[in-house]
Image (cartoon, rainbow, N blue to C red):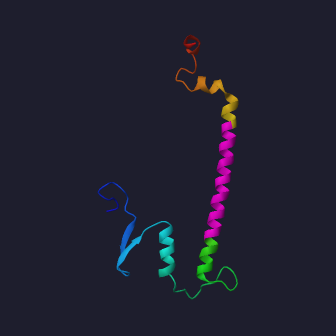
Amino acid sequence: STQSTWGKKINREYNESLNKWVVKYGRQRKEAKKHTDWLRELPENYKPKVKGGDPFHDDELDKKSRVSKQKRNQLKNEKKKFHSRAKVGALGETMGKLATASHGKYDKWRK
């Protein structure tokens, strides 16, 4: 099962080829993978992404492109968040009146 008796998620799994428990995800998994993944079988039609490259270098390039894409998307999301907050601030009290079920019909009696 993926949960321990205390409700915490278990981050280890048993690797039968190594005969020991290994980490499933996280930084320690990446470091452990370097020790076990030192030899790869390549298909006949393998072409490196850069001249003189190898599959390990290709993985590094893929990782860099994923990280840069994630950062671009993060900046885009922050930009959207900033603009949406500015719009809400410009509307001011109007949003407060519209946010109630009565659409501000009884607000004059509340004051």
Residue 92 lies in the magenta-colored region:
no
Principal secondary structure, stretch drawn in magenta: helix
| The image quarter in which residue 17 lies | bottom left
Q: Nearer the viewer, residue 107 or 45?
A: 107
Residue 12 appears left or right of 57: left
31 versus 77 height, above or below:
below
50 versus 99 height, above or below:
below
85 versus 45 height, above or below:
above
Residue 73, horizontal then vertical, whole percent? 65, 55
Residue 77 lies in the magenta-colored region:
yes
Q: Give the residue displayed 32% in from the left and 59% down from the top.
A: 4
Q: Give the residue displayed 49% in from the left and 65% down from the top.
A: 26
Q: Nearer the viewer, residue 95 or 35?
A: 35
Q: Quadrant of the C terminus?
A: top right
Q: Which residues are magenta?
A: 63-85
Considering every residue shown, the one lying at the far bottom of the view is 44
Q: Quadrant of the N terminus?
A: bottom left
Residue 27 appears left or right of 6: right
Q: Give the residue displayed 34% in from the left and 80% down from the top.
A: 19
Q: Give the residue displayed 59% in from the left and 75% down from the top.
A: 59
45 versus 2 height, above or below:
below
* Number of numbered callouts drawn: 0
Q: Nearer the viewer, residue 96 or 14?
A: 14
Residue 93, horizontal then vertical, whole percent? 64, 24
Considering every residue shown, the one lying at the far top of the view is 109
